[in-house]
Image (tube, rainbow, N blue to C red):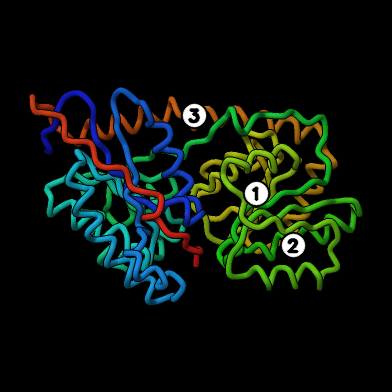
Amino acid sequence: MHIVSPTRLNIAIVAPSMDILGGQAVQADRLIRAWSGDPDIHAWLVPINPAPPAPFRFASRVKYLRTVMTQLSYWPLLLRELRHADIVHVFSASYFSFLLAPLPAVLVARLLGKPVVVNYRSGEGPDHLRRSPVARATLRSVDRNAVPSRFLQEVFAQFGITAEVIPNIVDLERFAYRPRRSLRPRVLSTRNFEPLYNVACTLRAFRLVQDRHPDATLALVGAGSEDGLLRQLAADLGLRNVRFLGRVAPSDMWQHYAEADIYLQTPNIDNMPASVLEAFASGCGVVATNAGGVPAILTDGVHGLLTDCDDHQAAAGAVLRLIAEPGLSARLTASARESCEPYRWEAVRAQWVSLYRSMVRPAEVSVPKAPRAIKKEETPTVTRA
């Protein structure tokens, strides 16, 4: 067990910067901001996407060369920054990303004698762990594993890996609850345009909703590899009142939930989507597919309505039911908002502090020197693949 000062712990959080706009980056940013000024924890970001030296910045525009140059910058950055940490907190996705980001962080932390907690967050965990002996061995070797959902905890257990659940953070002040006497056909989706999120199913479901409610609207917040395909599908379906809003800064996301009445998501693979919790907090009626860890936070008929994956008719039927039954929607949205209390920072903070403290043994030593701030220009703009 690592020996540290009994006062303030220094936590290096290895995660994507906000230049890679996605769930991991958003949660890492929220966590670091929440720790700001905390008397027990000093946390800072060690980005997995550092900028290469100035003469090689052109590499960020070339796909495979960008990966090579990022790695050449990433490993020295880990060596510089992790030496200042009492604990290394590593955010983790799956597949090739696991090899490029979490694995190097774990190896460097081990080299420096630092305890490691891996914060695994991928809905693709079942397939990834089945396929990757490297990932299984790495996760078994670290001091702690933390996952945001009971779903992933159960997945880890299937492979003999222990993990504890520490949920995502939801800002219940920013995503303020607005009671709705009845739900209008104002539909919102905030999933990126990638195959696993199956936004095409959302569009097909909205076609059936608009057949019943010609004035229905759909706002799509997101971007990704299927952008062109989804725009073409919307045109082929003859949809009206559909807005493709692109990427939206996390600080502005609350506005879209406030304007909507129904949140619809139809992924085929998922973990613990913060978007569903944000919809709960905002008072939106929620319809979602029962993918991955979604049923762990959304009980059908209690917090919202669940449907089978890739069933646009069932998804549309659930949306139409929320519109047609104000009593049902009022009961579901009130229950959903109540379920958000464990995701407040105060509750999540206590769990992280307990985990961190369990990884170290106090000793009367000097507090490690605070790391230098990582300059903005050291994190390039990287488009999510």
Of the two numbered discs 1 and 3 in the rendering, the one whose residue sits closer to the viewer: 3
Give neighbour class at mark 1: few <14, some 14-19, many 20+ (Cα, 10 Å): many
Give neighbour class at mark 2: few <14, some 14-19, many 20+ (Cα, 10 Å): many
First of labels 3, 2 by sequence position? 2
Where residue 140 sits in the image (x, y, percent)?
22, 54
Q: Nearer the viewer, residue 376 or 275?
A: 376
Quarter of the figure with the N terminus: top left
Q: Is residue 254 above or below residue 39?
A: below
Please tell me which residue is depicted at 38% across the width and 54% down the height of the picture: 155
Return the residue at label 1: 306
Drawn side of residue 109 relative to residue 231, left or right: left
Name the mark on residue 49: none
First of labels 1, 3 by sequence position? 1
Q: Nearer the viewer, residue 357 or 164?
A: 357
Please name the amino acid that badge 1 sits on. Answer: Leu
Please name the amino acid that badge 2 sits on. Answer: Leu
Where residue 235 sits in the image (x, y, percent)?
81, 70
Drawn side of residue 302 relative to residue 272, left or right: right
Name the mark on residue 203: 2
Q: For the residue labelled by badge 3, is the local secondary structure a helix, a strand or a loop?
A: loop
Q: Is residue 64 visible?
A: yes
Q: How many marks?
A: 3
Where residue 321 sits in the image (x, y, percent)?
80, 45
Quadrant of the rendered image containing residue 367:
top left
- Separation of disc 1 and disc 3 at Cα? 24 Å
Q: Is residue 129 visible?
A: no
Drawn side of residue 87 relative to residue 268, left or right: left
Return the residue at label 3: 344
Q: For the residue labelled by badge 2, is the local secondary structure a helix, a strand or a loop?
A: helix
